[in-house]
Image (cartoon, rainbow, N blue to C red):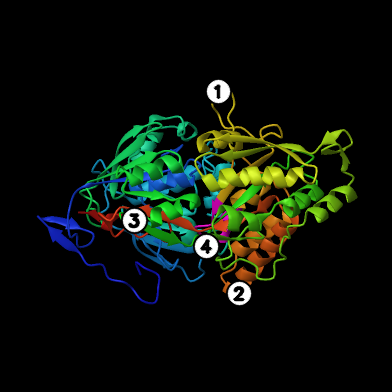
Amino acid sequence: MRRHTLLAAALTAGIISGIAYGQSCPKVGGTVTLAQNSEPGNLNPLIFPTTYDTNIQELVFNALVKPTGDLDYEGDLADSWTFSKDKKTITFKLNRKATWHDGKPVTARDVAFTFTSLADPKYNGGSYSEVQGIRGAVAYHDGKAKSVSGIRVVDDYTISITTDKVYAPILATLAGIRILPEHIYGKVPVENWQKDATNRNPVGSGPFVFKTFRSGELIELEANKNYFEGRPCLDRIIVRFGDANTMLAALVKGEVDAAPVPVPSVATVKSNPKLKLTTVNQLSFDYVGTNLRNPVLADPAVREAMAYAINRDAMVKGLMGGYGTVVDTVFPKSHWAYPKNVERIPYDPALARKTLEAAGWKLSGNTRSKAGKTLKFRLFYTTGNPVRERSAALIQANLRQVGIQVDLQAMDFPTLVTYLLPKDAKGTPRAVRASDFDLFILGFGIERDPSEYLSYFVPSDQPPNGYNFTGYTAKDGGDLLRAGQETVDTAQRRSLYNRFGLLMRKQLPWIPLTQPQALYAHQPRLHNFAPDIRGVNVNVTQWWVE
């Protein structure tokens, strides 16, 4: 089935002036300008994709499958798929109408190239773990095989993927891997993808075609008139970059059609009859990440005390205007893997002090020390998000009260990434060091299956091999995540991920903060703008303007 649900939804196709549209368009043409709080760092979707990157990439590229509104899966480039009896092989039939933006057909060889590239020994884009379970991927990655045996091109439009074991989140995993054209990206050594011109001039198969990238200013995209699911209603999308306040001001002036809304600006939007406010629940949360390579932060008592000292309720009520909730582990509360029995992290400065004292961190003046080491850290956070900026200041004040000194360092998102995913003098990604950073504030969106946490909490996936920024090395976390991958029993998977959530609450490599709601404002001239739990662009081909 193209959509793997009990009930299949039919799309209505509209035909205007001989051009096929993915849906009926009351009006065709026009330009929409979107606002984003930071510019993307990579436009190649296989190079450490962040939220800011993905917002652009999902307009340009397709995956084999994509999530539905109820978080099931339907075909994207895949027209249909079937599983073998042992559930280890999945065979995809591709949509024969799909073409790359240069007119060449999308074939099974492009899919095989994409997945094989992720297992290449020289690949350094952080997503090897996504294909690690495919049969033969490890052998190929380790230089013991010349190809990935579990990837088989049956014909031009049929490909099969075989995993070593039953892999429950296979569709969720594939939904996060956007397919690249071999005839373009195959000409570039995989280790050079991040530095190559293709990273700033992407060619995909998606509903919009990349045109221009003016760094620090905007990205321009044009409608793909030959899009296999039907031409978008719009002619063009422009994505502008700037901090939240600047972008909201542009929205009020009519220079921007849609923008994320910082909580302090909600009243401004609500009082403006020309703007419409949309509130969206998210599968994401904010957290303080710790660099466990730093021996001071490796002390569990220090992380536990910091968690007790941070007033997260004040963040929700005072900084977020009530548009959110506190979380106590690494899952958002709205996710099925969130453990209902997780112990609440109390706001208790006295308990924080007691915890530090018991661990030998003695107060001298305003700072605690032990064996010649002091509790003084740098806290990196990104600019452009007023709530996050104010949260950093609140955390600094909270920790100071218990004898932990924090030096705040603000930077834009691409700069923060250079600390979490560092490079050497030649521009080659390298391992993270204890001196690269201490603490950072980030958001994490679990847009797919909990198995994606493997890349964040498995020792082998520390940068440049994955996203284990913190340097988490405990074996028990990875064991639970792997077990969750290898069972298709829903209740058993829930139990395993619940246990993982409880373990993260105890070990605190990430100190969980809050689960915000997403707030967007848009001009009334923009119709069908309907962001949901999947993101802002989910129905972008249906947007139209008066």
Drawn side of residue 371 relative to residue 507, left or right: right
The quadrant where residue 503 appears: bottom right
Residue 322 placement (x, y as % from top left): 55, 60
Confirm or deny contact between disc 2 and disc 1 (CB under 8 A). no
Task: List the residue tagged with mark 3.
Answer: 77
First along the sequence among labels 4 and 2: 4
- Separation of residues labelled 3 and 4 (CA atoms): 18 Å
Which amino acid lies under the numbered mark 4 shown in the image of this protein?
Pro
Task: List the residue tagged with mark 2.
Answer: 491
> What crowding class fits label 4: few (fewer than 14 Cα within 10 Å), some (14-19), or many (20 or more)?
some
For residue 451: magenta? yes
The stretch of residues the image draws in magenta is: 444-453
First along the sequence among labels 3 and 1: 3
Which amino acid lies under the numbered mark 2 shown in the image of this protein?
Ala
Residue 514 placement (x, y as % from top left): 60, 56
For residue 487: magenta? no
- Separation of residues labelled 3 and 1 (CA atoms): 37 Å
